[in-house]
Image (cartoon, helix red, strand yellow):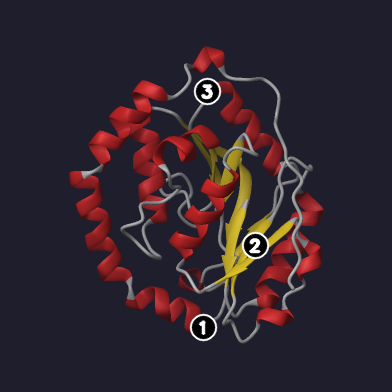
Amino acid sequence: MIVPSRGRPNNLDRLVEAWRTTSSGHADLVVALDDDDPALYQYNAHRVAMVTVGPRQSFVSWTNEVAVDHAEDYRFIGSMGDDHRPRTVGWDRMLCEALEEIGSGVAYGDDLGAGPVLPSAVVLTSDIVSELGYVLPPEVSHNGADRFWLELGRALDRTRFLPEVVIEHMHYTTGKSAIDHIYLEGAELLEEDRSALARYLAERFPDEVARLARNLAPRESAPRSLRSARLARNLS
């Protein structure tokens, strides 16, 4: 599960606590941090499976880089924000098992905001990442992830929404957190990202979906065992 973060070490601490009380061990938490983050050394890097540090990137760019780097190591690749909180015990196992049933696709739970309407935290099979070369369209930088994942799953007819799996989104728009400079930066990019995503969906998306439909494994040939790679890297 890939989580880019900037300027929010307390957010990550709260995510880790929720993770430790709910995860069944089917997922590794991978955090991506900017090397120019003033709060970089306030992060408790030892508490997660792996930390990647590098030049500043957007949420989308970080997620894509880490996902592509490790698509061969994991059967499943996930994405959430540092303001998500898993609430359901065994959420990781349940999402992975849902994807095992369909072979390839997108699975998500209830974020207690949009519900089934938009997936704000997802798990995908890594063959999608390997085939596309990204988890999110590189044309966008911060906004539109949920819309893309929804459209992708629908277009492939390979989506699983699990209402019994709660991964709460503690977003400021729902009154669950205070607005901060990261939220403000994202809001400033909203219209730009919306336009970029609209162009992608109109121009590139149909060809990408057709390619995935040709190359993804048939549902009945899905592997039944979970692959997991335990990777560790510390801040230096």
Relative to residue 202, is residue 213 depicted above or below?
Answer: above
Residue 33: name its quadrant: bottom right
User: In this view, which residue lies farthest toward the front?
Assistant: 236
Q: How far is mark 3 from mark 1, CA to CA?
A: 39 Å
Quadrant into which the C terminus falls = bottom right
Residue at horizontal 24 percent and vertical 50 percent from the top: 200
Crowding near the residue tagged with mark 1, few <14, some 14–19, many ≥20 C-alpha atoms within 10 Å? few
Type of the residue with mark 1:
Asp
Q: How far is mark 2 from mark 1, CA to CA?
A: 20 Å
Q: Give percent across and percent down for residue 168.
A: 60, 57
Residue at horizontal 57 percent and vertical 70 percent from the top: 54
The residue under label 1 is 180
Which element carries disc 3, helix, strand or loop?
helix
The residue under label 2 is 31
Type of the residue with mark 2:
Val
Crowding near the residue tagged with mark 2, few <14, some 14–19, many ≥20 C-alpha atoms within 10 Å? many
Residue at horizontal 80 percent and vertical 64 percent from the top: 47
User: In this view, which residue lies farthest toward the top?
Assistant: 220
Type of the residue with mark 3:
Ile
Residue at horizontal 33 percent and vertical 73 percent from the top: 189
